[in-house]
Image (spheres, grey):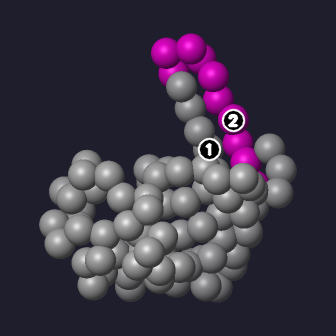
């Protein structure tokens, strides 16, 4: 599971660690399916789209929240901090 940092317009943004297998998977096949749930209300949705790996310090700062410091102690500019952006094409 990955935490969606933000959904802006038609794009979902998620933090990831640079060099992790998920980045290689995105590079090999950019078609993805995202699943979202709110079990308290029994609400679920799936969205499909195209993913891409992003290294953008300014965007990482804009999407940053202190809860992410657990994974990236050096903050949004940590050497291993990266983003995956998914342009949602349908749900």
**Circles 2 and 1: CB atoms closer than 8 Å:** yes
Residue under numbered circle 2: 45
| 2 horizontally vs 33: left or right | left
- The image position of residue 7, as x and y in percent, is 61, 50
Q: Main secondary structure of the magenta part?
A: strand
* Residue under the point 44% across and 59% down: 63
Q: In which quadrant of the rendered image does the C terminus lie?
A: top right
Mark 2–mark 1 Cα distance, whole angstroms, equals 6 Å
In percent of the image, x 40 and y 78: which residue is there? 57
Q: Is residue 61 magenta?
A: no
Q: Position of residue 53 (x, y in %)?
A: 55, 79
The first of marks 2 and 1 along the sequence is 1
Can you tell which quarter of the image residue 46 is in?
top right
Marking on residue 35: 1
* Magenta-colored stretch includes residue 41: yes
* Numbered range of the magenta stretch: 39-48
- Given residues 2 and 9, the one toward you in this image is 9
């Amino acid at each position: 599971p990955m935490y969606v940092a933000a959904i802006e317009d038609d794009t979902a943004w998620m933090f990831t660690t640079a060099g992790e297998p998920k980045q290689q998977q995105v590079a090999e096949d950019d078609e993805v399916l995202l699943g979202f749930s709110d079990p308290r209300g029994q609400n679920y949705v799936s969205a499909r789209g195209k993913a891409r790996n992003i290294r953008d310090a300014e965007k990482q700062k804009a999407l940053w929240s202190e809860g992410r410091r657990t994974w990236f102690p050096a903050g949004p500019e940590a050497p291993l901090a990266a983003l995956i952006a998914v342009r949602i094409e349908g749900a």
